Structure formats: structure tokens, C-alpha cells
Amino acid sequence: MSLVDIEDIKLANLRISKYLKKTELVSSVKLDALMEAEIYLKPEQLQRTGSFKFRGAMSAMTLLSEEELKNGVIAFSSGNHAQGVACAAKILKTSAIIVMPSDAPKIKIDKTKSYGAKIIFYDRQNDDRELIGQNIAENENRTLIKPFDDAQIIAGQGTSALEAINLIKDQNIEFDSAVICASGGGLTAGSAIALKHFNKKCQIYTAEPMEWNDHELSFKKNKRLTLKKRQHGLCDALESPSPGKITFKINNNLGVKGISVNDEAVINAMKFAYEEFNFILEPSGAVGLAAAMKSKSLFKGKKNLIILSGGNISKNRFNQYIA
């Protein structure tokens, strides 16, 4: 039996739906014509905290006991999971410590602080964020809220796809495929479980930056691979060297495949989303659209879901990218 199933996702949705902002599916004649397909975008950059990560954080934290809430939580993240946990902690009236890289985007640091979280910085080149987080969790008796490799996080992230499925049910539409950004793989795993439950033939693809394509390579080798040190690029939220143990098992078992794209493709997707939908996406949030546009032959004539995962980027940085 899987660690996570559709019932877990449905239960997570019941727990957290009152806290969520419903992100409606969007489409356009221009995008459909360009892709020669039906494309449905799920704009999770419009979600509370600016990304899908709030879903997983809330899913896990609404299951904490009174004692656990009293002791507080800790998480490690480059920004979007940090904000999700910090916001959930504020709502649930508990304290949060977030371990963040010192070079995280300023907007993500500032937003995390705005929810009342305490931030501890680390050097991503030399420090082990997981070890830092685990030590603090043990010393202060805090609950560690993992960014992806946790059943309740995965169930929470899967509510995005479940929401998308429910939005098109009345139209008698099923998704033939889906493209989902991947760092640790939690959003993909939760989404794949939901999508495959309603249509076993649905083909799911991870989308990653070319220099950090650990999922794509791992799927090809049928085992988890860990990338050696790579240069940091535009997609700071997706720079995980290896898929999660739990998430990879789920995704690989469900036949997920990988697509990777370069920075130019990501910027082009950001420009398109802004010009066509007035969406402001961070690079990591646009990588799914970039991957679909790069490999459009895979989606021709099909009904496709693309999850836009986040929009936490400063106006100045965004304008620099799309100029």
C-alpha cells in the first residue's frame, strides 16, 4: 500500500480548504494555438504566500497536537516552503524557526519574517541545512516540517491537482497529461496520485532547470541519483540535488517522466505568461510552462494541466528578466 493515496489527499483538502485561496484554471486561444493542444494553467502563484507550498505546510501542521503546537515548528527552505510554514504557524498560533540560505532572494526572506518567523541563515555551499534543522528540532523539542519527503506534505500538495480535477469535472474533461515543477518532488507526487486516480492513462512530467535535472536523470536510470555540485541558476527554488526517497518511489511507480529546460526557455515562459495572462512568475514558477513549450510535440492534440508553482519575485528582478 502506498504511503499516500487519494483518500489522504481528500482528507487534507477537507482540513485546509477553509484556509486556501481557490486558484481557478485559466486558458487562452493563443496558448492553445501555439501548443496545438488544450492547455489549462493552474496559477498557484496566486495562492496564499505566493506558492503551492502553503498547501503542504498547512496539511502537515493542522495535524499537530496541542503540545506540538505549544513547542513550535522548524523548517529548512530557500523561500517558498519557508513562507508556507511561517504563514501556517501564524494562523495556528505557534512559533516557527526557518533555516534559510544566506543568499535567498530578499523578497522571500522579508515575506517569511513578515509572518513572525525567526530566521537562521546558513551557507548553502558549506553547511548542511537538514543537520542544522534536525539539531534545533531536537534541542528545542520542535516539530520539523519537511519541505517534501513527508506523507502529509505530499497529500497537501496534491490538493492543487485535486482542485483542478474538480474544476473540470462538470465539463466532462479529463487531463491526458500534466507538467509540474520538481525540486524534491512533493508537488509532483501528490498531483500524480490525484491525476492517476481519475485517469490512469494520464502522463505526468516533472519540469526542472537543465543544470538541476535530478528527477529526469533518476527516472531514466530507474533509481535515485544525486547530482554533484552544480552552478546555481535562475530557478533557486528547484535546486535540490536529489529526489526525495518517498517522492521518487511514488513518482517512479506512477511512470512519471522528466523534462528539463535552460534559463532562456524559462525567461521566455515568464514573458509569455505576463503578456498573455498578466501573471508575474518567479523563474521556478514558470519552469512547467517552459518545459511544455519546449516539448510541445508530447502534448499535441491532448488536454494538458500545467501547474504554475510560484510568484515570489521582486518587481525589479522580474523586470530585469523579461526586459
Image (cartoon, helix red, strand yellow):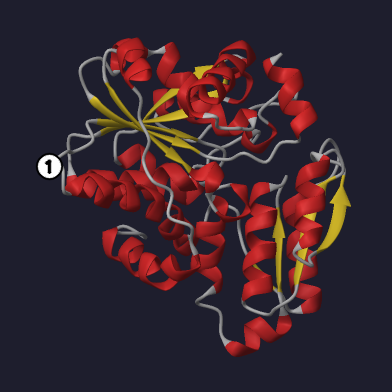
Q: Closer to the camera, 143 or 27?
A: 27
Count of marks placed on residues:
1
> Is 315 in front, or is 98?
315
Residue 74 versus residue 255 in the image, above or below: below
Residue at position x 71%, y 47% in the image: 79
Three-letter code, disc 1: Asn
Q: Which residue is mark 1?
A: 172
Q: Is residue 109 left or right of residue 193?
A: right
Residue 75 as seen in the image, left or right of residue 196: right
Image location (x, y in percent) of residue 105: 79, 39
Residue visible at 65% across and 48% down in the picture: 80
Q: Residue at x 29, y 50 (%)?
A: 194
In the rendered structure, the answer to whether residue 76 lies left or right of residue 256 reads right
- Where residue 282 sits: x, y (%)? 64, 32
Pointer 1: residues within 10 angstroms few (<14), some, or many (20+)? few
> Is any part of residue 229 visible from this angle?
no
